[in-house]
Image (cartoon, rainbow, N blue to C red):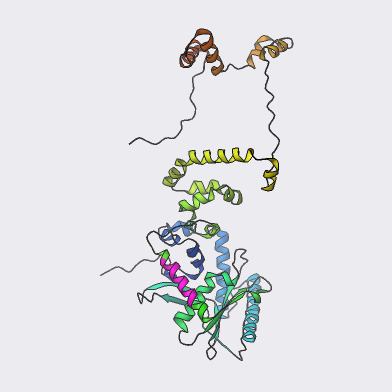
Amino acid sequence: MSEAKQFRDEERLDLPSASKMARLVACPGSHALEQTLPPEAFQADSQQEEWAEKGTRIHRAKETGNTLELDEEEAEIYRQGVAYEEQIVQKWMRDKNLDDCEEGPREMRVWLHDPLNFPELLGSVQLDAHYYNKERGCVLSVDWKSGFDPNLPPSPSSWQLRFGAVALKREEYTDWMKECRVAHCKAQQKHTVNDYCDYAEADLEMSWQAMRLHLWESTQPDAQRHPGQHCTFCPCKPYCLEAGGYSLLPSVAAKEKDWELQVAQMQPKDLVRIWSVSTITEKIIEAVKDRLKAMPDEDLAAIGLERGKGRSLDPIVDVPGAYSALLKEFTEESVLKCMKLGKTELAKLAAESKGKSKEDAGKWVSSYLDKFIERKTSEAPLRRIKA
Ligand code: SF4
């Protein structure tokens, strides 16, 4: 007897969901990497847990109409959301000239099947609220956002909303649905009634084809990972080489100040990979600096740079003169304590006056001054073990 498969995410059967669709489009390889993550990768911090619980309570109240478990703030968000949703519905009915409509099941999960491999599933979406007029073939899908999300894309760019519209057309209202309006109901923001997008029948078909392509791409063994701003909310981030490399780009590091944390969380083999390219990276950075420094001031200004004030060096070039002057003020011993002998300069002196090669002169200085030298080595550099 075969054992039942253990799912990490029982509700979504470990398949792509609408809320992850935008990430799959931007980074097809993220789905496969996500399946390999340890459980701790999905642990939210207490703040995130609190927000998630708030959202769950508000959505549950919306589903059941029972507001008893809401606190004062949540109840206010819920009331605003209900009022905004009503405005969204009214506007949709006006725009489409509808006399009436029916409300579909709330918080309904719709599964998208693979038509080439039925009944295999491709993914799912949970629809907060939707309305329809069957005779006219019109559907309205409203997605509630109970918190502030500065990264929320507008409705026409939302893969989450697109997924919902396509799933309704393909799986629920196949026979009669001709068009779908998708809308965000941002319960904490005003003017939410204008964040919507209309999908005609042809748009729904093209969106379905686009989704198929991206979902298929995400299941390929060589699905690529493309880092970007979308990494911010990806659970793979601490385990992903591409995100690590991206986070070390100067422009990103300047925006996200958690580079030490990123490095601390990387896998050892990824650290080796980054270390192994460090020499070339440093050379590139030096070459970039040299090129920039060689530019005329006006060219630098055109790209937002200017020459800063150089650190003052002011070396003492006449050492014998300075030495004699200082002896008038201090004892010889205290002046000598401030002086340093350069081994390179001494080797040069030995080479010239004793007729030695550069190498022999260096050895002579090291041996002749042995008792005056403190022998120590610098920090050991890393290098590859030879096979
Ligand atoms: S962290 Fe970024 S690059 Fe890595 S899998 Fe996630 S989205 Fe892709």
Percent position (x, y) of residue 191? Answer: 68, 74
Q: Against 316, is 112 above or below?
A: below
Q: How many marks?
A: 0
Identify the residue at image location x=70%, y=12%: 321
- From the viewer's perspective, tell me whether residue 387 is left or right of residue 63: left
The quarter of the displayed image where residue 268 is located: top left
- Quarter of the image with the C terminus in it: top left
- One can see residue 145 in this view: no
- The residue lying toward the viewer, choosing from 234 and 313, is 313
- Quarter of the image with the N terminus in it: bottom left
Identify the residue at image location x=53%, y=57%: 228
Q: Main secondary structure of the magenta part?
A: helix
The quarter of the displayed image where residue 187 is located: bottom right
- The residue lying toward the viewer, choosing from 193 and 276, is 276
- The residue lying toward the viewer, choosing from 223 and 101, is 223
Looking at this view, name the residue that lies furthest to the right: 329
Looking at this view, name the residue that lies furthest to the top: 354
Magenta stretch in the rendered image:
205-216
- One can see residue 138 in this view: yes
Percent position (x, y) of residue 153? Answer: 59, 67
Q: Does the magenta stretch include residue 351?
A: no
Identify the residue at image location x=39%, y=73%: 121
- From the viewer's perspective, tell me whether residue 26 is left or right of residue 299: left
Percent position (x, y) of residue 3? Answer: 30, 68
Percent position (x, y) of residue 206? Answer: 49, 75
The quarter of the displayed image where residue 70 is located: bottom right
